[in-house]
Each structure stands twice: as C-alpha cells, then as structure tokens.
Image (tube, rainbow, N blue to C red):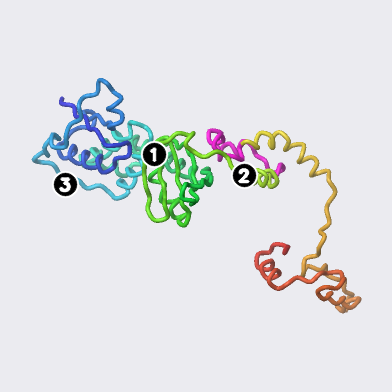
Amino acid sequence: MQRHTITLDHATDWPGFRQAARALVQANVPPQTVDWRCQADAAEDLFAPEPAASDTWPSPASDAPPLRVPPDFVHLCEQLILHRDPGRFALMYRLLWRMAQGGHEADSARHDPLDADRMLAHHMVRSVRRDIHKMHAFLRFRPVVEPDGQTLHMAWFEPDHYITVANAGFFIRRFTQMRWAILTPDASVRWDGQQLHTGPGAQRSDAPPPDAGEALWLTYYRHIFNPARLKLAMMKKEMPTRYWHNLPEAALITELAQTAHERSAKMVEAEATVPRRRIAGTTAPRARPAGGAPLSPALPRASPGTEGPTPAVSSATAAPAAATGRAAP
C-alpha cells in the first residue's frame, strides 16, 4: 500500500493541515498510510524523504462523499494542533477520516465520550488550555528603555505547548496601551501599540535582568505573605515548581515556608490589638431599660479639628466604606 508523507510549513500550520487532510480523505487514503511532519523536523532528519508537492496529492475518488464535520470538531482541532505531541496530526486526521466513513465509526468519532480517539483529543486540549492559563498567571514583564527613549515591557516564558502566538490576543486586550514583547523558545511576539509582530524563538539570555521595581515587588510580597494560610501542597499544584525559576517571588517561597510555622505560633500567642480609630457608625449599642428609653443621652459627635471620642470621617471616605463593608482608612 502506497504511503504518503505530508510536510507542513510549521508546527501549528492549521491551514496547511486542513488542506492536506481534506485532499487525503477525498482520495480515501487511510490514516495508517500517512506520515505527518513539519519542515523543521524534516530538516533535522537526514533520512527523511523529499516532501511531496501539493499537486502530487492523490486525486479524489470518484465516489468520494462530501466532507462535512461539526463546527465543534474544527474548534477542537484548532486547539489540538497547539499541543507539542508529534502524534497530534495523525490523531486529527484519524478522527476526520472516521467521520467521513459514515455508519458506526462516524457516530463514535462524533459523539461517543468513551471513544479512545475522542478521549485522547480532549485530554490533549485540556493540557493546552491549562498551559494557556498558566501563561496568563505566571508571565512577568520587565521594563526596558529602547534607544528611542520609549519603554518596552519584555517577558520570558517557557510554555509546554505551541501557544505563544495563539495566546497573544489575551495580552493585546489586557495591555492594549502598553508596548510589550514576549519571548519563548518556540516563537516571539511583540505589540507596538497598534500591530502584532511575530518572530522566531529566543533564549532566556535575551530577556532583561531584574530591576529596582522587581525588588519593590519582592518587598511587598514578603509583607503580604500570611503564614497561617500557607498550604504548600496546594500551592505547588496551582503553581508547579517548573515555573518557579522564572518568577521573582519564587525566590522567597522556601524561606517563607520554612518560617511559616514559627510565625503562625507567634501570631496566636500575641495579644489582641485595639484599633486606634473608631469606625464611624459602629458605636456599640447602649443598654435600654424595660420601657425602651435610653439610660443616658448619646454624646454629641466631635466636630472636625476638636478632641472627642470619635473623629469625624469625610463623606467621600465613609460612602465607599459603607458600600463595600470595609473599614475606612
């Protein structure tokens, strides 16, 4: 049986895969006879065959049925192609080919939640989505002054999958007015305030070193750390240690975790503190006799600038406090 080798332009070449897969299905080429690869992989393989040109693809079969797939399958493949597993192309084509066959195979590939191929595809997509979420959470920008005097915020990140370009839209919406660049081993993206530019991968040495603002952030992180709420196992689950070497605050975690128990014990043993200022509107209720009248008249509030039991609070400060239920400063 003749084998077919399909070479895509790059690791996330969705248009190229879609065009090749459609031609192969319409030619009734079974999945086990198709080898998928990217140009970068072919360049490193000394024994790889020459890539076939698009005009050498097999001709459509005379009885080839029209190829129609549900929209959710297209959306699934658009995310699945971002996975780093080299077998993702074969998996997508296998599902597509099964859907085109009709009958029980098509129903299983489309709807069966226990189908092995569907389960694997959804598992890989969840991994891609989780990696996208981690990039949102653990990316740290550092300002760099360029020769023209403008500030460019740069960040270094090491994703598990090919999500850099696909994830750029989130940062464009989040930091539209800021000029930034994100460097990863696979690709780099740069936003100039109006247009997104993509480029090749970079090295960690291309990212800027720590700055004074980072030292200020570490001071803030150290002071807001609550040892009584430390759950190291849960923290490592939500923030895997593989990301720590790119997070400035991670350098403090070991130290803060080692002293958390001692600091928590001191917090428990310490005496309760009394607020220096009484919050407006929270005066303790006075005892009343059976008749309901107060035992003594309420004391008048002190006017601004005078001594009294309760300092005055401006309406601009008291209104937000009342709305949020939080103490006014």
| Residue 34 percent location from the top left of the image | 22, 30
Tell me if I can see residue 114 in this picture. no
Asked if residue 239 lies in the magenta stretch, the reply is yes
Q: Is 127 positioned to the left or the right of 313 in the image?
A: left
Residue at 27%, 32% in the rendered image: 39
| Residue 37 percent location from the top left of the image | 28, 31
User: On residue 212, which mark appears?
Assistant: 2
- Decide which of tag 2 and tag 3 comes sooner along the chain: 3
| Residue 155 percent location from the top left of the image | 49, 43
Tell me if I can see residue 251 in this picture. yes
Amino acid type shown at disc 1: Ala
Tell me the quarter of the picture where residue 129 sits. top left
User: On residue 187, which mark appears?
Assistant: 1
Label 2 to label 1, Cα distance in Å? 28 Å
Amino acid type shown at disc 3: Pro
Is residue 272 positioned above or below 40 on the image?
A: below
Q: Residues within 10 Å of mark 3 (few under 14, many from 20)?
A: few
Q: Residues within 10 Å of mark 1 (few under 14, many from 20)?
A: some
- Which of discs 2 and 1 lies nearer the camera? The answer is 2
